[in-house]
Image (spheres, rainbow, N blue to C red):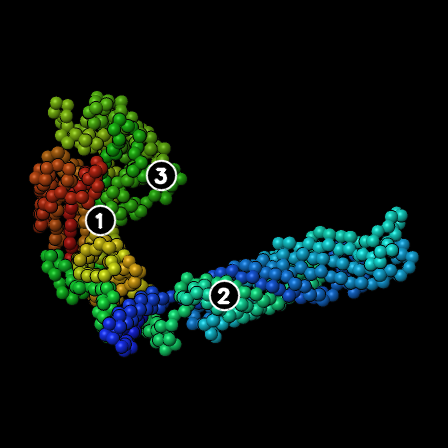
Amino acid sequence: MCTILPFIASIAFMLLAVPVAAQDSSTNVTTNQTTNVAFSRSLVDDVIADADKSLYLRYGVFVNAARNYHTANFREITGCPTCNPLFFGNKESWGWQAGVLGEMPLVEHLGASLRLSYSSMGVNVRQQEILAVGNEGIDKPTPIEHRINTQLGVFGLEPALTYRPLDALTLFVGMRLGIFLSAYYDNEEVVLVDTLAFKFADGTTSSKRNVRSGTIPNIASVIASAMAGVSYEIPLNRTGTVLFAPEISYNYGLNALTTDKDWRAHALRFGAALKMSPYRTIRPELTPEIQEKMRQLKRLDSIIVTERMNNAVQIARTDSLNRAITARLEEFKKFGLSVNITRVVGIGTDGKEIVKPTITVEQFHASVAHPLLAMVFFEENSAVLPSRYRRLRADERARFTFESVADKSNAVLYAHILNVVGKRMTDNPLAVLYLTGCNAGVSGETDNLKLSEQRAIAVSDYLQDVWKIAGKRLIIQKRNLPEQAPVAVAGVLPNSAAVAAENRRVELSSNMPEILTHVSMDFVKSVVTPPAVQFGIAMESGAGIKQWEFAVEQFSGTEAVSLLQRSGGKEYSLVLEWRFESEPASIPQTGQDITIQLTMTDVNNRNADTPILSIPVKQLSVEQKELNNAADKRLDMMDIIGFDAAGNLDETSLFIINRLRQTLKPKANLTILGYTDQSGDAANDKASAERRTQSVAKALQGFTAKVVTVGGTNMSDNSLAEGRFYNRFVRIQVETPVR
């Protein structure tokens, strides 16, 4: 569309430039010029609106008269005897057909159609003969007539291919598949002379015999026929959206109507259809020459799309065409549409802009150690495990693995705390788990040791029921406030709502540190330089912006992979930022260049888009560095959350850090970052983070470390008790040179 519109715009400008016929007075000249310009602008709108719309899309209804031709070589319908050996031969009858239709284009003038119809194709047969004396009591030669009337109603499905040698003339060929909705017959033999009659053995007489009626036996489940025909469309309105189409077609039956007789039906149909088109079919402005040029532009547009799927060299070859499109779009601004990517810059770690950036994606061997918060929190005055804790069924226990949660966030890991502890208790049969139930010490929970005990029992029940941990290995304890809890002043806790939520818990501890230690995982980490890219965008629309979309893609082989998408309505920001750390799924996966495009639609559903821009990508995989024996490093990260109120490390955290010390290499570079939640005074919170950071730095004495106190963070949800605990952490980052 973006390639065709500039060409349409140029046609529009030529139309606007058509001279106005001279008039006798200057007043008439001015009036006619104004009228001509208004007409041309309206014409331009029509061209833009309908240029890419299908000329041959139709739907409607049709009615046909049908001349049915029945061929048969049998003398009677099964179960309906006759004495005439030549009774049922080739017969003709009139019928009718009606239904609905739909037509759609495929390529150029070739298309497809589908019709649903109901057809009446019954036949009446009359056969006369002279009965000899003695037949059914006949005492003199008697003329009789054999009569059989059939009523056949068929529901049909008619798929076909269509070809339009002219815009209005359609040739179609296909087939018709039908099922019988009704298949009845009436049969009788009638004496034609009033004074004569059949005399039966019981002494009765009648002018009729062999009277039968009912459903035709052995009717076929499906009948098929080949079909071919022609129709011609006549517009009924100015724009050609309503059309009257006389038509004629012929159906040739391919199989018999019954399974036990060779009875076939063919039909010549002629009638008319009333068709509707959702788009204009009368387009005088699109001359054959212009239509041919538009087809050339569409083919060129298809070539451009193909070239986008190749490497940077192929994309570069389209730059000249993109510049031409941009120039055309500048002209097109006169119609009130303009869209542009004003700049593309990288943002370095120091915040400085990088002009013409190259995105470098380097892979490193890495590990992450997620801390396990050894607490389970409960709602106020409740001992029911909250739904945010992921509970397994007993039959799911065997399929649970640490790998399924270790590569996720702290929040995902914590939701499985009871399953992690349950699996570790299963793997360590000598381990004992202590469950200490606590209450908030305020409101209805004051001195409510029964509630504290019930909370511990709820945790114990889950571990016994699902993980089959023996009850003697689960030691239930109870107390009011936790040991490490703020003290109430005059019955009121500081920041009472948040603190009370943190005190409504069951604390977990064990005789084996391995039960509550970190959950670790090795993986390959991608580090992107620069860490962010900024895009400047500008959009204008005289009519008003309806919607816009910004897309970043990368080709992997011949398949385009979407890396980043931004979209919106009439409002948009002048600057879009792409940060790889916060959107790891958007990191480029191959060394192919990435492509960028901005598309906008105005309230009149007219589209405009920018030329395709590209950013080079450099990929450094672990395998490449190993093959080239290049300098490399390993990245390891561990979070510590086990601190007392004074900021000192608890036993579990000391165990973890001592184990880390044993793995550190002499040349390892350490960075220690201190964080806290955002629930209290910012200065006090940062002081708490500072104390925790120094505790970790002291435990790692002997290794050179960069110590940074960051302060408040919202990496985890501060509205949840566990989220605040997880935000009070110290992160240890280790970079170890490999070679």
Residue at x 23%, y 40% (from the top left corner)? 372
Viewer-closest of 517 and 70: 70
Q: Farthest residue in the front direction? A: 24
Q: Position of residue 682 (x, y in %)?
A: 10, 40
* Residue depicted at 12% across the width and 36% down the height: 680
Q: Who's the residue at 66% across and 55% down the image? A: 183
Residue at 19% in and 61% down: 538
Q: Nearer the viewer, residue 675 or 10?
A: 10
Instruction: Name the residue tied to disc 2.
Output: 244
Q: Secondary structure at mark 1?
A: strand
Helix, strand or loop at disc 3? loop
Q: Name the image quarter holding residue 272.
A: bottom right
Q: Which amino acid does the dot numbered 1 rest on? A: Val
The disc, 1 or 3, on the residue closer to the chain's N-terminal end is 1
Quickly name the residue at label 1: 368
On the image, the x and y values in percent for residue 200 come to 87, 51
Between 631 and 327, the one lying in front of the other is 327
Answer left or right for 626 relative to 210: left
Does 402 appear above or below 120?
A: above
Relative vertical location of residue 718 with respect to residue 359 in this rendering, above or below: above
From the image, tell me which residue sits under label 3.
392
- Name the amino acid type tagged 2: Phe
Residue 358 in view:
yes
Expressed as whole percent of the image width and height from the top left, the position of residue 614 reads 22, 67
Circle 2 SS class: strand
Q: In which quadrant of the rendered view does residue 713 lie?
A: top left
Residue 520 at x, y percent in the picture: 24, 47
Q: Is residue 241 left or right of residue 579?
A: right
Q: Give the CA separation, mark 1 to mark 3.
A: 25 Å
Quarter occupied by the C terminus:
bottom left
Q: Quadrant of residue 152?
A: bottom right
